[in-house]
Image: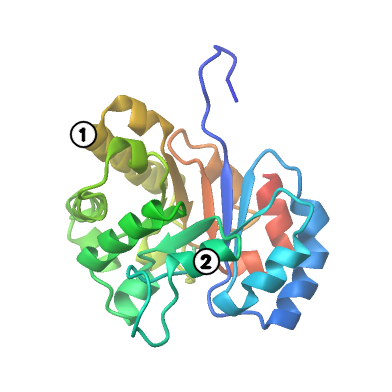
Amino acid sequence: MTDDQGEMMRRRIVAANWKMNMTSDEAGAFINTIREGINGKEAEVHIIPPFVDIAVVKDALKGTDILVGAQNMYYEDKGAFTGEISADMLTCLGVHSVVIGHSERRNIFSEDDEMINLKVKKALEKGLVPILCCGESLDTREAGKVSEWINAQIESAFSGISAQDAVKCIIAYEPIWAIGTGKVATTDQAQEVCLLIREKIKELYGSETAEDIHILYGGSVKADNCKELFECPDIDGGLVGGASLKPEFVDIVNA
Ligand code: PEP
């Protein structure tokens, strides 16, 4: 896609993180209600259901250009890792992308930066698109340490990853204080941190990678606030939690 000056433009991406919601029966029925509304749009749409719903969702999306993602994966190939899911298991189901380092994984399940880096590397090795999440807590923001925190998260997640691979990743900036709270970041706050992330990528990999990489905003995105967020120059779309479980998701994709 190019703009009026013939410059390459980044494609818009809207990703639906269902978290631990929807049985497979509910998932199939919900996809049938939103399928036509989200298919064939300019935006690239990723539906990211719980693991056990992936096959049903894939089936319900047959014949569309909508992509299916996973919410997590483990970085080992196989073995004695009870309860974990490997990258090969995901690709075998036709999964396109995988969320890595969501703040709920970091905070509730104690995933650290080192593990997140290993997961990003494994996802890339297996041909999955990592949707790498980063974001600060309210305490970090109030202490004036947002840039320090985000830069450290990005540096660590991309450690040992080439520019050629880095550009395949999608980064989601999700301020923890805005996730599921109804408290959306202002467009200025969201744009400021997404720009900061792009500048960090430029420092690590150069301007071409920084210009091409996709950066999303996530945190209480809804139909009535998404348009102005998506219009910010460094925000290429959204990672949507709560609102992706409702018919409202169609309006977000259309925005
Ligand atoms: C998320 O958890 O990825 C998210 C953005 O959630 P919500 O939209 O509900 O804040």
**Residue at x-position 67% and y-position 71%:** 55
When the figure is inspected, residue 247 is found, relative to residue 207, above or below; the finding is below
Horizontal arrangement in the rendering, residue 86 relative to residue 224 (left or right): left
Q: Residue 102 is drawn in which quadrant?
A: bottom left
**Residue at x-position 68% and y-position 52%:** 66
Q: Pick whichever, 66 or 5, lies toward us.
A: 66
Question: How far is mark 1 from mark 2, CA to CA?
Answer: 32 Å
Please state the horizontal and vertical placement of residue 111, each as a whole percent of the image. 28, 73
> Which mark, residue 90?
2
Label 1, residues with CA under 10 Å away: few <14, some 14-19, many ≥20: few
Query: Cβ of disc 1 within 8 Å of ligand 1?
Result: no
Mark 2 element type? helix
When the figure is inspected, residue 246 is found, relative to residue 191, above or below; the finding is below
Please state the horizontal and vertical placement of residue 214, each as a whole percent of the image. 45, 41
Q: Amino acid at mark 2?
A: Leu
Quick one: label 1 or label 2, which is nearer the N terminus?
2
Please state the horizontal and vertical placement of residue 42, each as a whole percent of the image. 68, 38
Quarter occupied by the N terminus: top right
Does the rendering let one see residue 182? no
> Which mark, residue 39?
none
**Residue at x-position 26% and y-position 28%:** 206
Mark 1 lies on residue:
203
Label 2, residues with CA under 10 Å away: few <14, some 14-19, many ≥20: many
Q: Are marks 1 and 2 in contact (CB under 8 Å)?
A: no
Q: Pick whichever, 29 or 194, lies toward us.
A: 29
Foreground disc of the pair 1, 2: 2
Does the rendering let one see residue 112? yes
